[in-house]
Image (spheres, rainbow, N blue to C red):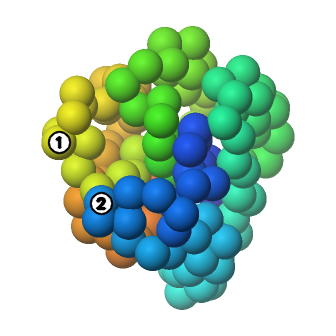
Amino acid sequence: MTKVLVVHGAGMNMRGKAQLDVFGPQTLDDYNRLIREYAAKVGVTVEIFHSNIEGEVLNAFYAAHDGDVDAAIINPGGFTSGAPSLAAGISQVRFPTVEVHVSNPARGNGSTFTRVCRGSIVGLGLYGYYLGLLAAKDLATKR
């Protein structure tokens, strides 16, 4: 079965607590619960990781590279318009990564990760994770 690493970046732990007008009332726990439901529907297993620290997220990608992960999804959160080391790391791993944003990062400065991810899904709310899992599974099976 395809294994997908789902990474939540900086500030994602504030979902449901701040910027409700942009991201809605769902908490990170709500996100994770829904992601697991979507994964079951899509037929993939997920490993979910969150950190507000760029180096920890980078280390999660490198550990996945050396492990049994077939693809990744990242919602970079607060790393979206920065985090050059993380972007460089994503370009180095052996598996495809799909970028997912609940809102549309074009409302700000855009995303640093668009150029290193195989694709981006933006502005579709939590449904974007479902599409991201479908895309990750498809990309992993075509490698």
Q: Name which residue lies at 65% across and 25% down.
A: 54
Res 20 visible: yes
On the image, the x and y values in percent for residue 17 come to 53, 63
On the image, the x and y values in percent for residue 34 come to 56, 80
Within-10-Å neighbours for mark 2: few <14, some 14–19, many 20+:
few
* Helix, strand or loop for disc 2: helix
Is residue 59 found left or right of 130 in the rendered image? right
Q: What kind of residue is marked 1? A: Arg
Along the line of sight, which residue is nearer the eye, 67 or 9?
Answer: 9
Pointers 1 and 2 in contact (CB under 8 A)?
yes
Which residue has dot 2 on it?
A: 22
Along the line of sight, which residue is nearer the eye, 16 or 53?
Answer: 16
Which residue has dot 1 on it?
A: 107
Quadrant location of the N terminus in the rendered image: bottom right
* Helix, strand or loop for disc 1: helix
Is residue 124 found left or right of 35 in the rendered image? left
On the image, the x and y values in percent for residue 70 come to 64, 49
Within-10-Å neighbours for mark 1: few <14, some 14–19, many 20+:
few
Res 70 visible: no
Along the line of sight, which residue is nearer the eye, 62 or 50?
Answer: 50
Q: Name which residue lies at 57% across and 21% down.
A: 86
Residue 117: quarter of image: top left
Q: What kind of residue is marked 2? A: Val
Residue 110: quarter of image: top left
Q: Name which residue lies at 17% across and 42% down.
A: 107
